[in-house]
Image (cartoon, rainbow, N blue to C red):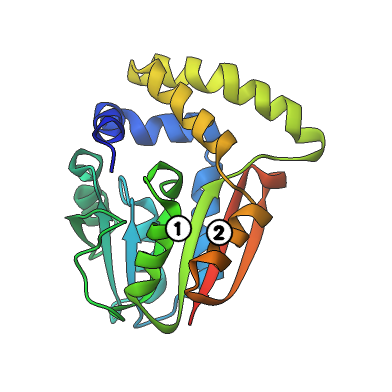
Amino acid sequence: MSEKVRTMFASIAGKYDLTNSVLSMGTHHQWRKTAVSISGAKEGMSVLDCATGTGDLALEFRKAVGSSGRVLGTDFCAEMMETAPEKAAVQKLDVRFETADAMDLPYPDNAFDIASIAFGIRNVDDPQQCLKELARVVKSGGKVIVLEFGQPDGFLKYPYKLYSKYMIPFVGGLITGNREAYAYLPETSANFPAGPEFIRLMKDAGKFRGQEARKLMGGIAYVYAGDVA
């Protein structure tokens, strides 16, 4: 993965949670809960969460799989995960965190019931290869879950464009000191395949027997679920 992207995330890691909460007004937490619900995660399951960042989605999965389950959070940027173990400890949740590239995972085939990636697949060099790799490590009949930004339609379309172009870079830059990063992030989400286009990407990966998209907040974000063949 791009060293430039890695460096960018390392530079904003310390203020990442605060910035997310301010920019989304806390809704990103509910989006993660929705992703876990759609995944069908149950007691005793094993979950791999890629691009885990500060661990929020991994922690939500840990609550769902219970004490008999296991959750592994990975990220290609080690600095992004620095606060994750402490967050897990505060919530008394047992989650392991490791540095790994979502396009080249160091785990065997069929090792997990669920593999997920939240707000990360648009930053990889080859999203379809990432989908194939996530599917590879999941057992047949398991799920790959992708939570990602989209482009809203309807009455939200133009207000969100203005918010993304002006407010996200301004507020993100104010909090983290890196305006460039928060100009890059909405730009990538605006250009990334969303909704039906991302479903086609999943189909073309050839690893899923079924896939679906769940629109959140009019398309500001989506949860995609792929049933591994």
- Residue 9 lies, in percent from the top left, at 30, 33
Front-lying residue, 102 or 96? 102
Residue located at (39% from left, 59% from top): 129
Q: Secondary structure at mark 2?
A: helix
Residue located at (24% from left, 34% from top): 3
Give me the C-alpha separation between circle 2 and circle 1: 6 Å
Check disc 2 and report the residue beneath it.
Answer: 201
- Residue 198 lies, in percent from the top left, at 59, 55
Residue located at (46% from left, 68% from top): 144
Q: Secondary structure at mark 1?
A: helix
- Residue 149 lies, in percent from the top left, at 56, 43
**Farthest residue, direction right:** 155
Instruction: Say whether disc 2 or disc 1 marks the residue closer to the N-terminus.
Output: 1
Check disc 1 and report the residue beneath it.
Answer: 128
Picture layout, residue 149 above or below residue 136: above
Q: Amino acid at mark 2?
A: Leu
Picture layout, residue 217 above or below residue 35: above
